[in-house]
Image (cartoon, rainbow, N blue to C red):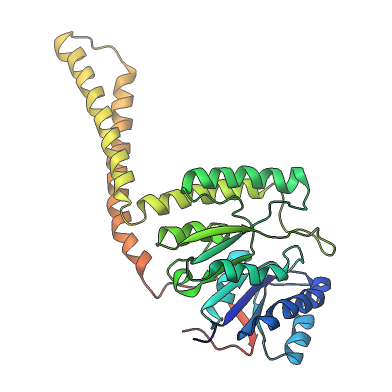
Amino acid sequence: MTDPEGISVVLPVLNERDNLEPLHARLTEALKPLGRDYEIIYVDDGSSDGSWEVLRALAAGESSVRLVRLRKNFGQTPALSAGIAHSRYPILVTLDADLQNDPHDIPRLLEALGDSYDVVSGWRRHRNDLWLSRRLPSNAANFLIRKVSGVPLHDFGCTLKAYRREVIEDVSLYGDMHRFLPVLAAWVGGRVTEMEVTHHPRTHGVSKYGLTRIFKVLVDLITLKFIGDFSARPNYIFGGFGLLNLTFGALALAVVAYRVLVLHHLEATPLVFLMVLFSITGILSLFIGFLADIIIRGFYDPRRKPTYYVRESVGVDRPD
């Protein structure tokens, strides 16, 4: 029998000072009985409430705790990316540090992961959040993401997830793409499933999300669709749009030529403006498509610039 795989638990932290000690106690209760090697990586994403001092105290008392402190607040996606980059075990578990995700669900996630799946996503079926500001926009976003991506999950926004490292290393995290990780994993061939997890009401601190995230999700969803369908062949969309405009321009030119040469109508017509507009738009779109095809080669450059900058770290090695 082979030894069970080690687990890296990654938690982005932003102003969660009062939640950190009880959260860590629950994490330890959930992880120790598993009989696996594990590490808990807290990523301080620019906290200003003293969270870093609490984390330093936790790291001083337990060798399994590893810390990464970012220079400022870069956002949840870069924070998760930093934690994953500084982790070392083949199984990755992510969750929020606000005590709404329950660490005791981690063993169930790992059991579901087994040998059959590469990603197990948490589903907060009974969610303890405000309906208007949290649950309504979340339900709308989840519906849109399901339809656009084709990945049939109920809750893309739940941070509590388990991954196999080899799948996560094949996707790139930037912007606010953390909620689309199961989609990105599925697009590189990962086997994705979900399971119901416990969701607790927030008792300390304040939520970092509101209604404004609807617009971010919509923009990210458009980006996600473009990446999924055209990231390797951007000229398909730009070139297609350009050819369509050139076709309209040619039709407008034909009508104008017929009016002038056959009907001898020399009065001004809006078709001349449309002819010029469609022609210029079509030519520019074709050139943008050609440039995009050239630039996209850099998308696969393994030396991409990171989306985060570390101020200091405790007990972790600098990633390659």
| In-image side of 26 versus 117 (left or right) | right
Front position in the image: 151 or 136: 151
Q: Answer with the quarter of the image where residue 242 lies.
A: top left
| In-image side of 187 versus 279 (left or right) | right
Front position in the image: 76 or 30: 30
Report the residue at 64% width, 68% height from top: 108
Report the residue at 20% width, 21% height from top: 254
Q: Answer with the quarter of the image where residue 227 lies.
A: bottom left
Q: Position of residue 107 (x, y in %)?
A: 65, 72
Q: Residue furthest left?
A: 262
Front position in the image: 250 or 118: 118
Report the residue at 33% width, 37% height from top: 281
Q: Position of residue 230 (x, y in %)?
A: 35, 51
Q: Position of residue 189 (x, y in %)?
A: 40, 62
Q: Residue furthest front?
A: 1
Q: How many marks?
A: 0
Report the residue at 41% width, 53% height from top: 228
| In-image side of 111 versus 102 (left or right) | left
In this rendering, does residue 31 appear at all? yes
Q: Position of residue 174 (x, y in %)?
A: 52, 63
| In-image side of 3 versus 189 (left or right) | right
In this rendering, does residue 75 appear at all? no
